[in-house]
Image (tube, rainbow, N blue to C red):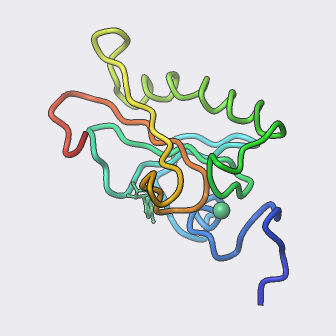
Amino acid sequence: MPTAGPSAAHDPNCLFCKIVAGKIPSKKVHEDEEVFVFHDIHPWAPVHFLMVPKVHVPSLAHAGPDHVGLLGRMMALAPKLALEQGCRPYPEGGFRVVVNTGAEGGQEVHHLHIHVMGGPRPWLKG
Ligand code: 5GP
Ligand code: ZN
């Protein structure tokens, strides 16, 4: 039985916590003290990776004042990683950033993640 509450740093049943911990393999793009980035297993675009905080935050709806710095650093990291992964520079190239939140927002994995998608059109979706 899990004993940790909703504010626990990691959720043993969470897919992305398992990926962060290396218990489920992923194609890693970047890792630092607070962020883990890996390729989406079903890419919608030629470049499609996911940026997740290492701590378990269920969704963007759970973000509060404590997360402002982390979210800002994740957003600022996105363009650097997008270029490294093959997105062409702005403005001809660029990329899309998506954070699905909740059921009606299309969120399927309940560990906050930023989708970063880019590369030549057409894309599989979007
Ligand atoms: P959401 O719909 O929650 O915004 O997006 C979840 C994303 O996680 C989907 O794009 C899906 O393809 C991706 N995903 C689901 N399971 C795995 C997995 O085991 N490994 C990786 N790398 N991506 C996954
Ligand atoms: Zn998690």
> As rendered, which of 36 and 44 lies closer to the eye?
44
Residue 85 occupies quadrant: top left
Q: Find the residue positioned furthest to the front.
A: 104
Residue 32 in the image: x percent, y percent? Answer: 70, 40
The relative height of residue 23 versus residue 28 in the rendered view (above or below) is below
- In the rendered structure, the answer to whether residue 109 lies left or right of residue 43 reads right
The relative height of residue 4 versus residue 69 in the rendered view (above or below) is below
> As rendered, which of 112 and 27 lies closer to the eye?
112
Question: Where on the image, by quarter, is ligand 2?
Answer: bottom right
Query: Measuring 71% from the left and 70% from the top, which residue is drawn there?
Result: 11
> As rendered, which of 22 and 61 lies closer to the eye?
61
Q: Find the residue positioned furthest to the left.
A: 122
Query: Measuring 62% from the left and 53% from the top, which residue is drawn there?
Result: 59
Query: Measuring 68% from the left and 27% from the top, which residue is drawn there?
Result: 72
> Is residue 59 something that shows in the picture?
yes
Residue 76 occupies quadrant: top right
